Amino acid sequence: MAMNSHTLSRRAFVTATTATACAHLLPNPRAAEPLAEALIDIHQHTHYWGRDDTGLVMHQQALGATKTVLLPGGTYDGLEGYIYSNESCMALVKRYPDKFVTFANETTQAPDARATIEKYLKQGAIGIGEQKFRVESDSVYSQRMAELAQEYNVPILLHFQYGKFNTNFARFEQMLKKFLKVNFIGHAQSVWGNVDLNHDQSVLYPTGKVTQGGLTDRWLRDYPNFFADLSAGSGLNSVTRDEEHARGFFARHQNKLLYGSDCQDIDTKVKECCGIRMIEAIHRLASPAVARKLLYENARRVLKIN
């Protein structure tokens, strides 16, 4: 049974048990009726695994996103060529300025990284990232990115993955101490594995009960400039592996967590789309007031979105 986002509220859509077929949704979000609740998705990509702009627009409309943050790739693409770069994101923002904003990005260690990112910041990009490249988390190149973010007073979103991207996660604490004026948004496997005090760094998607007090838990508590992006399978896995822990985690860090989808699908199917499943989990495990912060208020504040 297909469901049209004109006739369903976002909450009804989220709680439904049948699949949503995006082919039945309008490709122009301006034509849709206003949603009952505002939702900011801080993590999406253009041409993610070949999904075109029309597919992305329909996905975000079905998701219920009233504002979406686009994250471009880089020239030497740690995002492995499956997303498009700055110009693609800027073009979609120009087409739908009420629905999309964008970050600026370039390969961390590229010689012209600063000049490229600065160019798009001057054109209206509101942050730097997704920084998903093969560097140490506290490398000299990473420090140059942080200096640029500090200069322009914008956040920087980083993908941390053991042995691959922004590696040696524990050393990132030195960045938090050195760049106190920069808001760092952590994303991906190493961020979400390290909610657990007993995390094995080599395990990307750990299972079982969580012992409170891991690096991520501590940094969210101790550093005003550290935030976490709830997106993707890594964020969803962290929440659903131990829902009792997640309830406390949401309450404890209610001002530091930002909703993102990072979905690569076109159809937003309730049982398959990680963005939909995270929205469901937030509503299930957080109070209404905390859920509002995670789904909207924190992103509006940290990313300075109107």
Image: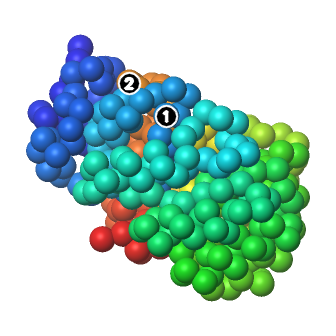
Dot 1 amino acid type: His
From this view, report whether residue 55 is shown above or below residue 101. above
Q: Which residue is mark 1?
A: 47
* Residue at the image position 45 percent from the left and 57 percent from the top: 102
Of residue 241 and residue 298, the one placed in the foreground of this image is 298
Q: Position of residue 7 (x, y in %)?
A: 12, 33
Q: Secondary structure at mark 2?
A: loop
Residue at horizontal 77 percent and vertical 67 percent from the top: 142
Residue indicated by mark 2: 267
Q: From the top left corner, tell me how far across and down residue 298 is, in percent.
A: 43, 69
Measured from the top left, where is residue 197 in percent x and y?
81, 59
- Check the picture and name the quadrant holding the N terminus: top left
Residue 180 in percent (x, y) is at 68, 85
Q: Residues within 10 Å of mark 1 (few under 14, many from 20)?
A: many
Marks 2 and 1, how far apart in space? 15 Å
Label 2 environment density (alpha carbons within 10 Å; few <14, some 14–19, many ≥20): many
